[in-house]
Image: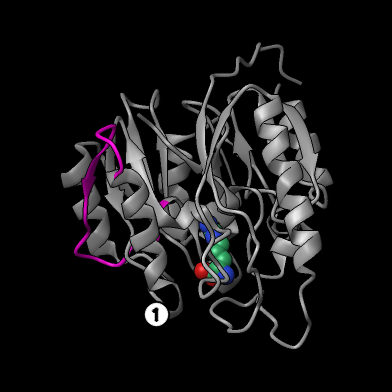
């Protein structure tokens, strides 16, 4: 049990409503095209996630959904920003390619952001996490299923932060954000089994005090969480994970995102953090 006071920091997020959400192709093991999704329920659940974030005092921007882009609700994949610089996404699969264009247009509106278009395949915050207070500010980056290792080096050049490459080895946890999450500016939680043995050693070395999750937590999408440093928003199914973050001094806030899980995502996938 932790006695540390975990303090929240106000955040700005980008979300996209699942108005056109369907599962009509399979690009990860969770996607089953034979069972129909309930788009109405997906939208209601998405709205409660958005209300939860705004209720905690955070700002949520909304991206217009496009009918031909059913995965657009997973806005985390559209880009990765650090200190006002945005490293654009380039999707692995053609079905999602145009989402990057919609995100780019968002960042290029006004002059708040320095947008850098990528050369290499990378799926934004799906495979990149930022810890502003760990080692002076480091990026954790996943590869193995979606993002190319070459994009890790590219992100380091664009963002000017050390990028630690981590190899994902379990297809069920195909994006970094299904296997690891930042709990605050310096602490992480992760499921070791999603990573190669060498990457597990890297994580253990960098984060000896990490909250360790197990396979059941990861399968409940309990690591696909959004934290403001105090409140940890996670899927309702992830009850055991809720206890683990509570024991570490955070406040779990459960939100039901059962429909979005059918596309292979949960809370974090549906929320991009905008770091200005
Ligand atoms: N159906 C989407 C895909 O496979 C889900 C993306 C989930 N997003 C995430 N950040 N893990 O690309």
Who's the residue at 64% across and 60% down the image?
18
Q: Looking at the image, which is closer to me, 225 or 73?
A: 73
Relative side of 155 to 32, left or right = left
What is the x, y in percent for residue 53?
Answer: 66, 33
* Residue 17 can be seen, yes or no: yes
Q: Residue at x 62, y 77 (%)?
A: 29
Is 114 located above or below residue 100 in the figure?
A: above
Q: Quadrant of ligand 1?
A: bottom right
- Position of residue 31 relative to residue 164, above or below, is below
Q: Residue 93 sits in which quadrant?
A: bottom left
Element at badge 1? helix
Q: Residue at x 44, y 50 (%)?
A: 125
Does 64 appear in magenta? no
Q: Is residue 126 visible?
A: no
As drawn, which residue projects farthest toward the left?
157
- Circle 1 residue: 94
Residue 42: x percent and y percent?
Answer: 75, 60
Tell me where residue 250 appears, x and y as whole percent: 70, 25
- In the image, the residue with mark 1 has its CB under 8 Å from the nearest atom of ligand 1: no
Residue 149, above or below 200: below
Quadrant assignment for the C terminus = top left
Residue 121, given in percent of the width and then of the height, sits at 30, 67
Q: Which residues are magenta?
A: 109-124
- The residue depicted at 56 percent of the width and 46 percent of the height is 271
Q: Is disc 1 surrounded by few (<14), some (14 to 19) or many (20+) residues within 10 Å? A: few
Screen quadrant of the N terminus: top right
Asked if the stretch drawn in magenta spans residue 110, the answer is yes
Residue placed most toward the observer, 276 or 165: 276
Q: How is the image coloured?
A: one colour
Q: How many marks?
A: 1
Q: Main secondary structure of the magenta part?
A: loop
Nearest the viewer among 175 and 271 is 271
């Amino acid at each position: 049990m932790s006695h540390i006071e975990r303090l929240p920091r106000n955040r700005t997020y980008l979300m996209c409503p699942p108005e056109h959400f369907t599962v009509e192709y399979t690009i990860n093991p969770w996607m089953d095209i034979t069972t129909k999704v309930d788009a109405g329920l997906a939208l209601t659940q998405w709205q409660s996630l958005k209300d939860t974030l705004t209720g905690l005092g955070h700002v949520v921007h909304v991206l217009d959904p496009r009918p031909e882009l059913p995965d657009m609700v997973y806005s985390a994949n559209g880009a990765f920003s650090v200190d006002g610089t945005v490293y654009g996404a380039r999707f692995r699969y053609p079905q999602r390619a145009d989402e990057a264009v919609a995100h780019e247009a968002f960042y290029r509106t006004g002059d708040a952001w320095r947008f850098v278009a990528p050369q290499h395949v990378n799926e934004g915050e799906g495979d990149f996490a930022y810890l502003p207070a760990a080692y002076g500010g480091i990026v954790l980056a996943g590869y193995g299923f979606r993002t190319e290792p070459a994009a890790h080096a590219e992100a380091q050049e664009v963002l000017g932060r050390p990028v630690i490459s981590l190899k994902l080895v379990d297809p069920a946890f195909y994006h970094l954000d299904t296997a690891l999450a930042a709990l605050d500016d310096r602490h992480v939680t992760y499921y070791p089994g999603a990573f190669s043995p060498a990457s597990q050693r890297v994580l253990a070395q960098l984060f000896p005090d990490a909250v360790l999750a197990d396979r059941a937590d990861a399968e409940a999408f309990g690591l696909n969480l959004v934290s403001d440093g105090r409140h940890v928003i996670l899927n309702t199914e992830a009850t055991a994970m809720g206890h683990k973050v509570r024991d570490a001094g955070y406040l779990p806030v459960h939100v039901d995102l059962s429909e979005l899980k059918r596309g292979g995502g949960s809370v974090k996938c549906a929320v991009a953090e905008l770091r200005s």
